[in-house]
Image (tube, rainbow, N blue to C red):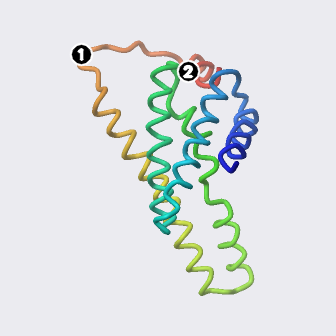
């Protein structure tokens, strides 16, 4: 049930960014996949590790979908990361800062930074491995203008 809600949250987020059709559904499925992996690793009792592995799953999914749909991987990755963004941790960190609870501020802030770092490291690891594995040798690519690229990213 939680994966279904994460799917709908990703659909709503994608609609805000004007994503449509198959791209929106596939990107939202990536969000459900990430949350499924996160819940699957619940037995480890280490949520930073859970976020790291779930981010790796969504990053691999995004890279594969980017090649299948011939679109940038970031289009799928941004939507798929939405359920894992530590918004609550940021909120509580700021709340503890405002009320002056320094101990909880540091504890919650470091935990939130750990989650954000796990998300970033997961994306970096997968993206780097895909770039190394798919580096075109001797193929020249055509340069395109920024307006053409913006059109291709979201449609």
Mark 1 Cα shell of 10 Å, populated few (<14), some (14-19), many (≥20): few
Residue underneath mark 1: 138
Q: CA distance from mark 2 to mark 1?
A: 23 Å
Q: Could you say where residue 126 lies in the image, as x and y percent from the top left?
A: 38, 42
Q: Could you say where residue 148 lies in the image, as x and y percent from the top left?
A: 58, 16
Residue 137 appears in which quarter of the rendering?
Answer: top left
Task: Kindly identify which numbered label has been placed on residue 149.
Answer: 2
Quarter of the image where the C terminus is located? top right
- In the image, taking residue 135 as reference, residue 71 lies left or right, namely right
Label 1 element class: loop
Asked if residue 89 is positioned above or below residue 120 in the image, the reply reads below
Q: Which residue is located at x 46 percent, y 58 percent? A: 118
- In the image, taking residue 54 as reference, residue 83 lies left or right, namely right
Q: Which residue is located at x 56 percent, y 42 percent? A: 33
Residue 64 appears in which quarter of the rendering?
Answer: top left
Q: Which residue is located at x 63 percent, y 19 percent? A: 151
């Amino acid at each position: 049930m939680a994966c279904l809600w994460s799917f709908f949250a990703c659909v709503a987020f994608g609609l805000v960014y004007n994503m449509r059709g198959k791209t929106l559904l596939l990107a939202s499925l990536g969000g459900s996949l990430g949350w499924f992996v996160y819940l699957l690793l619940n037995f480890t009792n280490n949520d930073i590790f859970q976020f790291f592995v779930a981010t790796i799953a969504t990053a691999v999914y995004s890279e594969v979908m980017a090649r299948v749909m011939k679109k940038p991987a970031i289009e799928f990755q941004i939507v798929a990361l939405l359920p894992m963004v530590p918004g609550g941790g940021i909120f509580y960190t700021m709340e503890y800062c405002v009320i002056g609870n320094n101990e909880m501020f540091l504890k919650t802030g470091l935990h939130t930074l750990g989650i954000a770092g796990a998300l970033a490291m997961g994306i970096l690891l997968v993206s780097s491995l895909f770039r190394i594995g798919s580096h075109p040798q001797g193929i020249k690519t055509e340069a395109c203008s920024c307006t053409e690229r913006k059109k291709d990213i979201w449609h």
